[in-house]
Amino acid sequence: MKNLVINMSKFQTPRGMRDLTNEDLRYFDKIRKKCGKVAEFCGFKRIEPPILESTELFKKGTGSNTEIVQKQMYNLKTKGGKQLTLRPEGTPSVVRAYLERGMESLPKPVKLWYFGPFFRHERPQAGRYRQLHQFGFESIGSESWIVDAQIILMFYTILEDLGLKNLVIEINSIGDRSCRPHYNKILLDFLKKKQRFLCPDCKRRLKTNPLRIFDCKNEKCQEIVNQAPQTLNYLCKDCHKHFKNVLETLDELQLPYNLNPYLVRGLDYYTRTVFEIISGSEENEGSLVGGGRYDELVELLGGNETPACGGAAGIERIVSLMKKEGKKMRSLSKANVFLAQVGKLPKRKALILMEEFRKAKIKIVESLHKNSLSTQLKRAGNLGIRYVLIMAQKEILDNKIILKDMKTGKQKKIPIDKVVKEIKKKVK
Ligand code: HAM
């Protein structure tokens, strides 16, 4: 769809949203295929929760003190007065489905993956859309560090298979309910001393969830955060052991990671391992993948105490990077056959013949809406198609069709029931 003039028509896509064109969707399809293969190999089953969920699910799951819940959700009220939200992320939905569909009784871990649209009312900029697409993997029911490593490896493998280079895994551990409260206290004591330098949002965060201050983009807050106590120094014995095992496995897998003591991630449900995958190349539009362990979320949403781990990748960001790094999608295979027709009966018969070509998996181009033979031959010529089948009134009555070789200019009549076989010999 090159060289299309974009008109300022009366109706336009909402800000931060866009049409996905055929070109974009070829990248999307490739990514989905890759994901599906890796997911199947690793025993993950596909799930697609609805786009709308109860607002309460995200308030509770994602966390009412997060940017997403406070500022970015598209909320609506149904005619019946129910409060629903266009899903801003997938993890609470997957856990809701896990509980609602009785998956708690399945052998653990229950491994699920998804691919679809999400909605966040953010300020649009490069790599930041209001309708974005993610694929995600969620493994529910195991506390083993091997799961964390496997999930990271799956994302890394997919990105690498898509041809992306210079990938780096940023990783940290933010502890669990036994060690985080102590760390929070230490952090709070530190931040209170710097309170007057913090932005208004961070002053509020001091009261709600001090860990959120690490996500603040304000320069002054960043400076303070860079001197703050690090979660890693306050992990309990179990969290420390878990994290050490994750890192040792990444070493074993020879995955390039950067231990980032200030990575906390902007969602409330994380415990222990948190990670992001970024591109080390200059063209960075933010993280490509984000995820981590969420050992308390299932319980928070009404289930039994159940450890879990997962992550999600931003498809727009991956596609953008693939394009910038020169990864082209193979163009659709070219057709070698053109079906021309003249007259009412040939037009109808043409549709029947096309069906036979479709079943034989032979690509064919037509201009069924055209009547003039010369126009149709001209189009076949412009498309560089070698074989033209001409269905004309007289020949059709004899059950014949004309086969014209555009390269040699020669033509011959062949029985209509032999034409697919004849063409197959020439083009396959
Ligand atoms: P997240 O970090 O909010 O995590 O999003 C995951 C990925 O989605 C990001 O790394 C980024 O590539 C992409 N993304 C996020 N916001 C936008 C946006 N506005 N425009 C374009 N791309 C965007 C989650 O969503 C968690 N549910 C991940 C997870 C799964 N954690 C555990 N399981």
Image (tube, rainbow, N blue to C red):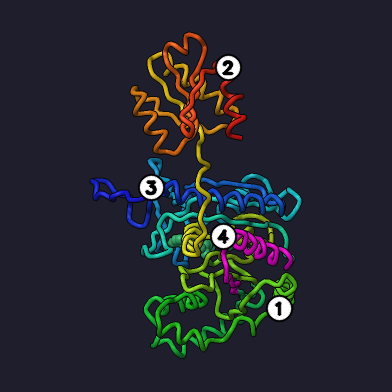
**Structural crowding at the residue carrying mark 4, measured as other residues with C-alpha within 10 Å and reported as few (<14), some (14–19) or many (≥20):** many
Point out the tag, 4 or 2, that comes first from the N-terminus: 4
Residue at 47% in and 13% down:
396
Q: Is residue 262 visible?
A: yes
Q: Which mark is residue 312?
A: 4
Rounded to the nearest angstrom, the CA distance separating label 4 from label 2 is 52 Å
Q: Amino acid at mark 3?
A: Met
In the image shown, does 219 or 313 lie closer to the viewer? 313
Mark 1 and mark 3: Cα distance apart in space: 53 Å
Circle 4: residue type: Ala
Q: Nearer the viewer, mark 4 or mark 3?
A: 3
Closer to the eye: label 1 or 2: 2
> Where residue 408 sits in the image (x, y, percent)?
48, 32
Amino acid carrying label 1: it is His
Amino acid type, label 2: Asp
Against 427, is 310 above or below? Answer: below
**Mark 4, mark 2: which one is toward the viewer?**
2
Q: Locate residue 174, reporting x and y percent.
A: 61, 75
Residue position for label 3: 1
Q: Which residue is mark 1?
A: 240
Q: Residue at x 34, y 22 (%)?
A: 371
